[in-house]
Amino acid sequence: MIKNVSEILEFFIEKEKEELEAVEMKHMPTLGEAYEDLLERGINDYAIPKGLDLKIVTGFIKIRDEIVQKQIDCMLVRGEGKRYGKKYIYDREDVLIIFEVKRKLSSQSLYEGWRHLSDITRECT
């Protein structure tokens, strides 16, 4: 018996991860996008209550009229934003959380993720 939404999300992520790992994908941008999509679909479909006007997207943050040039793997946003290809551009005020997605966690990937998020945070303040 399922007691929490998090259990559904964990089950979904595990099943999707098995499918991703069954394909030997060496093209790193494509592999990274697959894991970002996994997070995006999992949270959008299972964790965010309907009707809140919240969603997870990939894209960029805009401050005043300037777009921060570092791409955000996933961000929890409110409202519509502006679609740019498969990505979105959101005003800083509408970005609630930013996520850095890593396929495997190592000290190097943790440091790289921290640096990326630090750079974005600095540009957004």
Image (cartoon, rainbow, N blue to C red):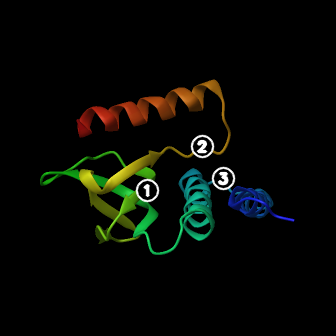
Q: CA distance from mark 2 to mark 1?
A: 17 Å
Give the percent coordinates (x, y) of residue 125.
Answer: 23, 35
Helix, strand or loop at disc 2? loop
The residue sitting at 33% across, 33% down in the picture is 119
Give the percent coordinates (x, y) of residue 35.
Answer: 61, 56
Q: In the rendered image, which residue does mark 1 sit on?
A: 76
| Number of other residues with Cα within 10 Å of mark 3, as a class: few under 14, some 14 to 19, many 20 or more | few
* Residue closest to the eye, 62 or 106: 62
In the displayed orientation, state which residue is furthest to the left: 65
Give the percent coordinates (x, y) of residue 64.
Answer: 13, 51
Helix, strand or loop at disc 3? loop
Amino acid marked by disc 3: Lys
Task: Using residue 48 as the reference point, say whether residue 19 is left or right of it.
Answer: right
Quadrant where the image shows the N terminus: bottom right
Helix, strand or loop at disc 1? strand
- Determine whether label 2 and label 1 are within 8 Å by CB: no
Q: CA distance from mark 3 to mark 1?
A: 28 Å
Q: Which mark is residue 26?
A: 3
Vertical placement of residue 68 versus 18, above or below:
above
The residue sitting at 43% across, 47% down in the picture is 98
In the displayed orientation, state which residue is furthest to the front: 3
Mark 2 or 1, nearer chain start: 1
- Determine whether label 2 and label 3 are within 8 Å by CB: no
Q: In the rendered image, which residue does mark 2 sit on?
A: 102
Q: CA distance from mark 2 to mark 3?
A: 15 Å
Give the percent coordinates (x, y) of residue 53.
Answer: 39, 70
Mark 3 or 1, nearer chain start: 3
Mark 2 or 3, nearer chain start: 3
Nearer the observer: mark 3 or 1; the answer is 1
| Number of other residues with Cα within 10 Å of mark 2, as a class: few under 14, some 14 to 19, many 20 or more | some
